[in-house]
Amino acid sequence: MKRTVGIISNKYFLVSAFFVAWMLFFDRNDLFSQYEYRKQLHKLEEERDFYTTETERVKKDLKELTTNQEMLEKFAREKYLMKKDNEDVYVIIKEKNKEKSSFF
């Protein structure tokens, strides 16, 4: 008992304990901030991966559209509803299934 009281009342122990508490909880780079930074870094890495794959897909589509006339026409018809002079365009929209309401 005397030994633990002696250790706790030691000025070096008190300064070290205060320093550790300060660094863990009150510093601007405390544990909570480090957790938030890691979470934000993970989110940004996921976004980077997503945009990298999207960029590659768009580059591939662009190359395909600039080299293949049939793909260009298909793209214009599907995305912009364009048509040739002698064609008619019909847009078919799928309806969602409506749930039947039951009366009790």
Image (spheres, grey):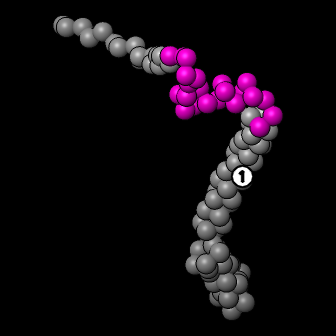
- Determine the secondary structure under disc 1: helix
| Res 35 visible | no
Tell me the residue at 55%/17% (across/down): 86
Residue 48 shows in this picture? yes
Specify few, some or many for label 1: CA neighbours under 10 Å numbering under 14, 14-19, or 20 or more: few
At x 74% / y 34%, what residue is drawn? 65
In this view, the residue farthest toward the left is 104
Quarter of the image for residue 41 reads: bottom right
Q: Which residues are magenta?
A: 66-88
> Is 55 situated left or right of 43 in this image?
right
Q: Position of residue 39 (x, y in %)?
A: 64, 56
Identified at 66% across, 27% down, the residue is: 73
Residue type at mark 1 is Arg
Judge from the rendering whether residue 34 lies leftward or rightward of residue 92; answer left or right: right
Instruction: Name the residue tied to disc 1.
Output: 48
Q: Is residue 104 above or below residue 65?
A: above
Percent across and percent down for residue 67 are 81, 34
Query: Quarter-wise, where is residue 59 in the image?
Result: top right
Report the quarter where the N terminus lies: bottom right
List the single residue furthest toward the front.
85
Residue 77 image offset from top left, x and y in percent = 59, 26
Front in this rendered view, residue 58 or 45: 58
Residue 67 is one of the magenta-drawn residues: yes
Q: In the image shown, does 11 or 58 lie closer to the viewer?
A: 58
Give the main secondary structure of the magenta stretch.
helix
Query: Nearest the camera: 86 or 11?
Result: 86
Residue 68 in the magenta stretch? The answer is yes
Say above or below: 91 vs 30. above
Give the residue at x 55% y 32%. 80
